[in-house]
Amino acid sequence: MKHRAVVVALLVLLVFIFLPFAGFSVPWILPGTLNVVNSSGTLIVLALCFLFAGVAVGYDLMIGFTGLLSLGPVLYFASGAYVFDIAISRWNWPLVPALGLTFGVAFVLAVLLGAIALRVDGIAFAMVTLAFAQAFYYLIENNPHNLTGGDTGLALSDLRLPTFLSGAVSNTRNLYWVALAFLVVAFLIIWLVTESVTGHIFVAIRENERRLDVLGIRPFRFKLASFVLSSLIAAGGGVIFILVIGTAVPSTVASTSVTISILIMVVLGGSGTRWGAVMGAMVYVYLQQYLLKVSGEPSFTTLPAVLRVPLSQPQFLLGALFVLFVLFVPGGIAGLTARVGYKRDASLGKPRWRSMSIAKALKK
Amino acid sequence: MSAFLVITFSGLALGSIYFLAASGLSLIYGLMDILNFAHGLFMTLGAYAGYEVAVHLTGSLGAPASLALAVLASILGGALAAGITEVLLIRPLYGRPVSQILVTIGLDLAVVGLLMGGFGSSALQIPVPIWLLEATHLGSVDLPNASFLALGAGVVVLLVLEWFLRRTRYGIIIRAGVENREMVSALGIDVGRAFTLVFVIGGAMAGLAGLLYALVFSGDLIAPAQGDSLLIFAFIVVVIGGLGSIRGSAVAALIVGLLQDYTSFYIGGHPGWAEIGNLSVVLLLAIVLEIRPRGLFGAVA
């Protein structure tokens, strides 16, 4: 089973790598202006899918594997986007030092704020991380020394970027590959970590932290490590986001709604399964973009208001879908397929047990 | 000096609204272990219920009477929304606290989306009587009338809530449930009914808080996402006060309201410090958790 999963994953990856060369159209799945597979609109949607999939799988390390319900991944996502953007656009730094600064800042922030937040656990931990992320949002809105551009945001200047990355229109294909590479790297890191001894300690923290303490292993350092690694991946996602979208605005990069989206992606896909988070993010971002496009179609405005009003709001449809999943599909997409393939591999999925894992973290 | 008094008064009014929002959250958490992300939605729905009533009745009943009915509508709207949420979405998920939290997140997202579709995402103006926009001259200072409304509502609700929780049978069941839920069920008391009740009470207070916030602090404007931004402060108040403690929420709400108003008035006026009011509240949360992780009045962390 394990080998088969790897082969399937590699095949899917190959398809995605060569997708930008596919010039045919897919009328229903890719609506309106997106309908050609390698149009720049489609490639940007897919790049967004990849980058959020990477962020989601990193977030899953924290909530799914370590059992830490952080509600602040957006802080590191936003710090990645803004620090990179500021270094490039305001200070005219070259790419490599800008990346170094970005990850350096994210590391320091994650260690400091993580250490403070981890003094409490369960619900209080969730609250503190949420509050820190909100504070960061206010900081960006506050526009210190005119660095962040406040409400209006900060566009990425492509003067200092290497030519293969500059300009979302002319280099969409390259940005697409960069986003895909980010997902692959993030996934491999999480895969290696969760298979390692450290990863087993993460899971042990989720299952029974006190027991670990009794065994002489201090959970704090491991919790912090999980928090920091997850945050660094979120910061990487922020960098890719600013490269793909080209501008950072507090409401789309730094607000709590981003955290909620990432949380929904992981739960939708099934937490604690690695590829579940990837699937969840791909489905979520694709649906979001798809629904936005569809609600703008001319045929849509002829619908009666009772149908048009709810259907024109992607937020309503995604929220409702999420509620249905929570009520009826507790293990997410991964849980569904695990139930179908139950006989082949009984160790996969176990939806009830998975959803209990976060419950234990909250009970502490 | 007079500026200080005006700021203090406005901070107390803000604290009073935070108390209305936070005490319900705190009760729900204390009794059911649910971090209710739909609480912001209850605030928003209360505000929209009040708006609808005020818009439709101002013409026929006049502004003062329709305002009174709008306040009533906000309370009923919040209570109804919370009751429906508990019965339809929370009840099927008893025993799965994480799913309950997630379902409130999804519900909030969905219904705020629906409000944006139905009412538009821009702000709407609630029609109010003129006197609500005026100020009362007391000694050397002018105090806005709307703030009196918020403060009065906060005091009345605190007294009624304390009376309810200490003197009535259901109140005592709720308090006992907050202390030890398993014991209460073991004694043969239907805790499920108490669950619905705290949701309804919390929703009613949230609905009122949503309308009052619009009347006092946002120039009578309401918007679909307003409740969600208030919710974060309500969460902070609950954690500072101690999860599950009503008095803790009351004290923390006043501290947070005053701190936010003082810092934004005395420091926020300087260039580059505009958001200091909001930032200082988060800083206070961090300090409280460092010194006393279970909050000011919390029994357990």
Image: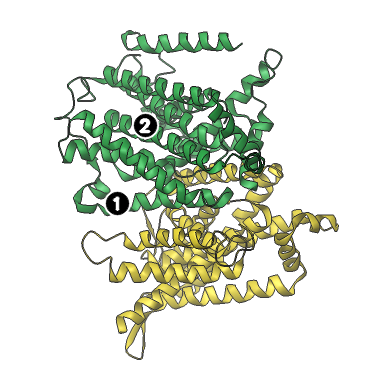
Q: Colour of chain B?
A: yellow
Question: In the orientation shown, which residue stands out farthest toward the bottom?
Answer: B139
Identify the residue shown where x is 34% and y is 8%: A22
Which residue occupies the foreground of this view, B210 or B131? B210
Q: Where residue A238 sits: x, y (%)?
A: 34, 34
Query: Label 1, on which residue?
Result: A141
Image point (77%, 69%), residue name: B169
Chain A: drawing colour = green
Q: Quadrant of residue A301?
A: top left
Q: Position of residue B105 (x, y in %)?
A: 54, 44
Contact between marks 1 and 2 (CB within 8 A): the answer is no
Q: Amino acid at mark 1?
A: Glu
Q: Residues within 10 Å of mark 2 (few under 14, many from 20)?
A: many
Of the pair B26 and A93, the residue shown nearer to us: A93
State the residue at coordinates (51%, 28%): A277
Q: Position of residue A6 (x, y in %)?
A: 52, 11
Q: Is residue A71 above or below residue B138?
A: above
Above or below for B176 versus B84: below
Residue picked out by circle 2? A237
